[in-house]
Amino acid sequence: MIRQHGSIPLVTWEPGDGEVLNKANQPAYSLKNIINGNFDSYITQWARLAKAWGNPFFLRFAHEMNGNWYPWSEGVNGNATGDYAKAWRHVHDIFVREGVTNATWVWHQILGAIPRSMVSIPVIATLIGWGWMVITSVTLNLGAAGSASTTSLIPTGGIIYILI
């Protein structure tokens, strides 16, 4: 349906247990387990399915990594400095190995949190753009005099980088 409208979907891939996703302590989903290949069969399967689908999409893997609320954040869940970039590269390399060319990678760090080791984008990808991810709030006033709408920006969100 999204592609029928000419849109390109953004897929957010959060490596964690969906039942407890907002809890940082999930040892099964530590960055070391991703780096060591514990999920390679799943990642490879996902990469092959993405390639077979053939349509372009944005892939935001393990976003807001510079916070402390996700199991892929450094400094929590047994993750050490430098582990995030290694895990990101590992997943990216599987997609490259499988010949996936329709994924555009999104590196998304949250504003307001102090970055640890991920102050730079992994050098295995090419930066093709950057921007802000902004959450908007829309208020509609549908009074008798007609309708009006206002949009205000909430100062949250994050810096995003578009990579290939």
Image (cartoon, helix red, strand yellow):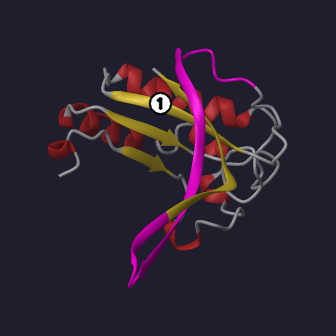
Determine whether the residue tagged by mark 1 lies in a helix, strand or loop. Answer: strand
Residue 149 located left or right of residue 21: left
Q: Which residues are magenta?
A: 120-149
Work out whether 118 lies above or below 4: above
Which residue lies at the image location 32% right of the left edge and 22% below the top edge? 101
Residue 114 located left or right of residue 54: right
Specify the amino acid type for callout 1. Answer: Trp
- Residue farthest to the left? 4
Q: Position of residue 61 (x, y in %)?
A: 52, 42
**Which image quadrant for residue 26?**
bottom right
Q: Position of residue 86 (x, y in %)?
A: 65, 29
Q: Which residue is mark 1?
A: 105
Characterize the local packing of mark 1: few (<14), some (14-19) or many (20 or more) Cα atoms within 10 angstroms: many
Q: Nearer the viewer, residue 77 or 156?
A: 156
Count the labels in the image: 1
**Which image quadrant for residue 5?**
top left
Magenta stretch, overall SS: strand
Work out whether 17 lies above or below 34: below
Q: Position of residue 12 (x, y in %)?
A: 46, 49
Q: Nearer the viewer, residue 62 or 55?
A: 55
Which residue lies at the image location 28% right of the left edge and 37% below the top edge? 50
Q: Magenta stretch: residue 144 in it?
A: yes
Which residue lies at the image location 48% right of the left edge and 23% below the top edge? 93
Residue 39 located left or right of residue 135: left
Q: Position of residue 89 (x, y in %)?
A: 57, 27
